[in-house]
Amino acid sequence: MAGRSQRVAPVKAVVFPGSFDPLTNGHVDIIERASEIFGQVIVAVLFNPSKEALFTQAEREALISKQFARYRGRVSVVSFSGLLVDFVQSTKSRVVIRGLRAISDFDYEAQMALINRKLAPQIETFFLTAREEHSYISSTVVKQVALLGGDVRGMVPRVVSDALAKKREERRRQGRRPL
């Protein structure tokens, strides 16, 4: 291939970035499949101060860590802020994993992959499509359904559904609106 003459080290870990507010079964599926393909997944929990998250950074990390406790050495959880490419380079990885639910996700994700490639040409983005049963699930929808009292057990891991129920109860006790 033209322009690709230098040898590159094999990938030891891949980065799966996101806000994970909250972690969904779709996220779990992507993380599990990526760990089978690549061996190790670094789940990178984005800290974005301009977004109001339902769960704190520490709560999101703890929920993901608890869900993947049995994957010791294969799944790790880390927070980051700033540019994704800077974070990926700090991990010594060069691969980003992104999940796609629908064709509309591809438009946005392809644009982000191209921007990241412009900023750091050595970083590659791999897309994994969601399994059909998870293709309708988004963190936003899960939060809305859960905080309005709906059943989200088929959309999120048990550890997350329990945490969502607690959040809903906290908000109710505080007299706050669901969202």
Image (cartoon, rainbow, N blue to C red):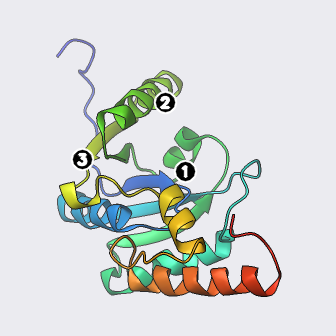
Q: Residue at x 21, y 11 (%)?
A: 2
Circle 1 or circle 3, nearest the eye: 3
> In the rendering, which numbered label is found on residue 90?
1
Q: Nearer the viewer, residue 167 or 9?
A: 167
Reading the image, the residue beneath label 2 is 116
> Which label's residue is closer to the chain start, 1 or 2?
1
* Quadrant location, the N terminus: top left
Residue 71 in picture, x, y percent from top left: 32, 80
Q: Count residues near mark 2 (Cα–Cα under 10 Å), then give few for <14, some for 14-19, many for 20+.
A: many
Q: Quadrant of residue 67?
A: bottom left
Query: Would you say 45 lies left or right of 175 here?
Result: left
Reading the image, the residue beneath label 3 is 129
Query: Would you say 175 lies left or right of 166 here?
Result: right
CA gap between label 1 and label 2 equals 15 Å
Q: Secondary structure at mark 3?
A: strand
* Quadrant location, the C terminus: bottom right
Circle 2 or circle 3, nearest the eye: 3
Q: Secondary structure at mark 2?
A: helix
Q: Is residue 93 above or below residue 114?
A: below
> Which label's residue is closer to the chain start, 1 or 3?
1
Residue 151 in picture, x, y percent from top left: 43, 78
Q: Dots 1 and 2: beta carbons under 8 Å?
A: no
Say which amino acid is labelled 3. Thr
Residue 64 in picture, x, y percent from top left: 47, 75
CA gap between label 1 and label 3 equals 27 Å
Q: Dots 1 and 3: beta carbons under 8 Å?
A: no
Residue 138 visible here: yes
Q: Nearer the viewer, residue 23 or 39?
A: 23
Say which amino acid is labelled 2. Asn
